[in-house]
Each structure stands twice: as C-alpha cells, then as structure tokens.
C-alpha cells in the first residue's frame, strides 16, 4: 500500500499531540480535584446551592473534557500502532488509501472520507 505521507513525521506529530493531550489531561484532573476541595467550606459544609450547581456543571464539563482526551489518546495510540504494523493510511473498512489531506488534518483517521460519510449516515 502506497501512502505518500512521511511516516516518521506523522509518528513524531502523533507523539507530540499525545504529550500535549496528556499534559492537558493532567491539568484537568488537577482542576477537578481543586474544584472539589473548594466546593466544601471550612466547616465541611457544601457551599450555597447556586454555587454548588455551578460547581457541578464545571465538574461535569471537566470530566467530559477528560473523557474526550482519553478517547483521543486511544485514537493516537492506535494510529501509532498502525504505523508500527505498517498498516497506517489504509481505510479499516474498504482498505483503500486514506487521502493525504485527510491524514494531515486527522493523523489518527481510520477511514477514508467516503467510508466515514457512510458511517455517519447510519
């Protein structure tokens, strides 16, 4: 299979993306822990109901961002695995090459644009 992208450059980019996401995820975990500590006042009681609702929303957003980071890390790890296995750049559905432009935009892409569109239509 002929992929016209520079595999080593792609792997470096994926590793850099992975490191950035891990750092951002670490900050999110710290922020979530800090917001949980701040949600309880000195007496050990929860703060005002409106504050509590706002803190709950903030924590929900932070947890959602952590979940998104986990999914992206898994996609990056899988792409690195495909590079190592020599299957990077092939659509997992039809086995045709994924367009270079798509791989440049989403280096962890697993499907060509046609198969991805089919998948999204259901």
Image (spheres, helix red, strand yellow):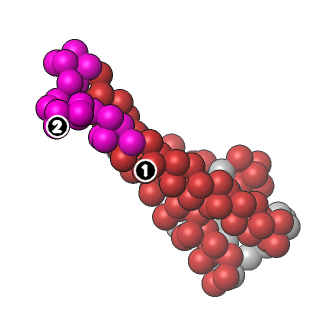
Q: Secondary structure at mark 2?
A: loop
Front in this rendered view, residue 74 or 44 = 44
Instruction: Tell me if residue 19 comes above or below residue 39 in the rendering.
Output: below
Mark 1 lies on a secondary structure that is helix
Residue 18 is left or right of residue 34, and the answer is right
Quarter-of-image position of residue 21: bottom right
Label 2 Cα neighbours within 10 Å, binned few <14 / some 14-19 / many ≥20: few
**Depicted 64 relative to depicted 8: above or below:** above
Viewed as shown, does residue 3 lie left or right of 60?
right
- The location of residue 107, given as percent across then percent down, is 68, 57
- Is 92 covered by the magenta stretch? no
Residue located 30% across and 40% down the image: 36
Residue at the image point whose x is 63% and y is 72% from the top = 80
Q: Which quadrant is the N terminus positioned in?
A: bottom right
Please report the bounds of the magenta region as a residue range: 34-52
Q: Nearer the viewer, residue 113 or 32?
A: 32
Q: Which residue is mark 1?
A: 29
Q: Earlier in the sequence, mark 1 or mark 2?
A: 1
Q: Quadrant of the C terminus?
A: top left
Query: Residue 62 placed where, x, y %?
Result: 40, 39
Horizontal placement of 51 versus 71: left or right? left
Can I make out residue 53 in this image? Answer: no
**Which residue corresponds to mark 2?**
44
Residue at 23% x, 33% y is 42
Q: Nearer the viewer, mark 1 or mark 2?
A: 2
């Amino acid at each position: 299979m002929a992929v016209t992208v520079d595999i080593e450059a792609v792997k470096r980019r994926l590793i850099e993306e992975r490191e950035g996401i891990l750092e951002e995820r670490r900050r999110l975990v710290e922020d979530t822990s800090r917001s949980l500590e701040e949600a309880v006042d000195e007496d050990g009681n929860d703060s005002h109901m409106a504050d509590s609702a706002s803190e709950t929303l903030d924590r929900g957003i932070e947890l959602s961002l952590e979940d998104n980071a986990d999914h992206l890390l898994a996609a990056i790890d899988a792409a690195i695995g495909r590079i190592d296995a020599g299957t990077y750049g092939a659509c997992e559905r039809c086995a045709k090459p994924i367009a270079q432009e798509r791989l440049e935009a989403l280096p962890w892409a697993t499907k060509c644009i046609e198969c991805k569109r089919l998948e999204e239509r259901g």
